[in-house]
Image: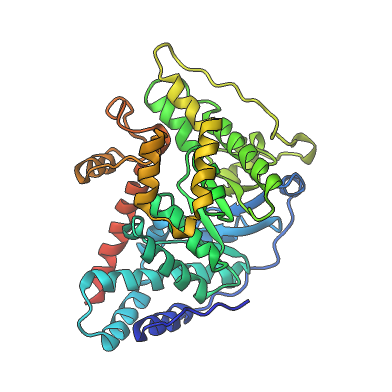
Amino acid sequence: MSFQLSNPTPKESLLMDLARALPHIPPRVPTPTSDPSLSRLNALGTQLWLDTGNLEEASGLWRKEMSALTTNNTLANQVVQTGIMDETIQDTAKHVRAVEPTISESDLVMDIAFVVNCHIALRLVSAFGSLVSVELHPSIAHDTEKTHRYAQRYFAVNPTHFIVKIPLTPEGYCGVARARADGIPINYTLGFSARQNYLAALLSKPNYVNIFLGRLNALVSDNKFGDGKNVGERVTLASQAGLQELRGADASIPTHQIAASMRSAGQMLSLAGVDVYTIPPKAVAEFYAQGHKPDDIHSQLSTDYPVSFVPGAPVAEFEKLWTIEDAFKKFAQELANRGGATLTGDDLREADRASGTRLFTAFTVEEQEEIRKGGKIPNLGRWAGRASFDDLMTEAALQSFIVDQSALDNRIRSLMG
C-alpha cells in the first residue's frame, strides 16, 4: 500500500524523511506464544490491542492473538520523559531550522512532536509487525484543515501499519470524514456515549470508535451517584449494538467498536465479543495471572447489565449515554445526508442547537481551564445543566491530553536549543 502527501512543502518533505528514519531500529520480538483464552476472545470476534507505547513493556505481554498497539498523548509523553527520544528531538530541530530558519517556536514544537510520535510508533511496528494507532496533537482538535493534513502526514509515513487517532470534536467529525475520503484508516477517539459513536459512523465512517468505559464507571462513583458498576459496560454494549445496526443496513460503514480505558481483567470477560479491546498493560497482566480457561469465556453482546443509582441521582442524564433515541437517529441521518466532508464544526454546532441534542457545548476558555484542572472525572454538580455528560467527559479527556502534551512539548523546548 502507498499513499503520497499531496503538494508537500519543502519542510513537509523533510519531515516525512525524518519521520521514517529511525536512528535505532529495534529487532523483531521473538515469535510470540499463543494464549488459549485470548484465542477464544478472537473467536468471539474481539480484536486485541495492547494499550502502550513502551516497547519494552509491551514485549513481555505480547501474544500471538494480539494485532495492534495504540499510543496517545499520555503514553507518548511517558516514553519521551525517559529520554529515549532526546536525540531525535535535537536532530529534528536542527534539520527543520536549516530548511525554515524563521519558523516559530510553536510550529517547530509541533513538527518535532510529529516526528517523535512517528518514531515511537515505528519502533513498535519494527518490533511487532503490527498495526499502531498514532494520535494527533490536541492543539489542532478544533481545526478541521490541520486535522485532515496531519492525518495525511501520518498515513504517508506508513500507510501499511498506521491508524490515525483523531479526538472527538465537531471539527473532528468533519476532519475524519475528509480523511476517510482519502482512504485513511481512522480511530475516532474520546467517545463516551452510544449516540456520539452512532453519529460518527453515519457522518464520518471511521474505522473505529471508542467508549472509555473505565472513566464512565468512575464518573458515577466519584460523584457519589452510585458504585459505578456496569455503567461503562452498558454504554459499550449499547454503542456496539448501534454500530452493528448501521453496518447491517449500509455496507459502506466500516465502523467498529473499541472498548477502551479498561481497568481490570474482569472487563475483558464482561465485554467478550465487542469488536476491539485496547488493553492497558496492568489489565492484561492481571488477566494472565488469573489463568482463565477458554470454556469460561462467552459472548456478552446480549447481556443487559444492571446499573444502580442512589436516590436523587440524575438518572435521565446518565441514560442518555447508552440510549440512541429515534429523534437522534433522525438528526444524525439528516447531517449525514448533507455530507460530512463538506460540513464545518460550526455547521454541526448550529444543527445541535437547532435540534436540542446538546452534544456540542461551547465551553469558554475559562471553563476549559477549569475542566483541565479538574482532571479526567469532572464534578457533575458544577456542570449541571451546562453540558451533557458525554460531551463533558469528552472535553475533560481532551483537556487531560493537553496537560500531558504540554509536558511532552516542554521537554521538546528544553532540548531543541
* Place of residue 35 in the rendered image (x, y in percent of width and height, measured from the top left): 73, 51
The residue lying furthest to the top in this view is: 311
Give the vertical position of 331 relative to 76 (above or below). Answer: above
**Does the rendering let one see residue 367?**
yes
Say which of 199 and 281 sits in front: 199
Rendered location of residue 308, percent (x, y):
52, 18
Q: Position of residue 319 (x, y in %)?
A: 50, 25
On the image, the x and y values in percent for residue 204 come to: 52, 54
Does 251 sit left or right of 189 as displayed?
A: right
**Residue at screen point 36% across, 83% down:** 9
Q: Residue furthest right?
A: 295
Residue occupying image coordinates x 52% and y 32%: 327
The chosen color scheme is: rainbow
Q: Nearer the viewer, residue 192 or 206?
A: 206
Q: Is residue 200 above or below residue 312?
A: below
Is residue 163 shown to the viewer in this render? no
Q: Nearer the viewer, residue 105 or 2?
A: 2
Residue located at (57% from left, 52% from top): 208
Residue at the image position 47 percent from the left and 78 percent from the top: 5
In this picture, residue 369 sits left or right of residue 112: left
Give left or right: position of 403 versus 324: left
Q: Relative to 407, is 42 on the left or the right?
A: right
Q: Quadrant of the C terminus?
A: bottom left
Q: Against 21, is 49 above or below?
A: above
Quarter of the image where the N terminus is located: bottom right
Total labels drawn: 0
Nearer the observer, 312 or 357: 357
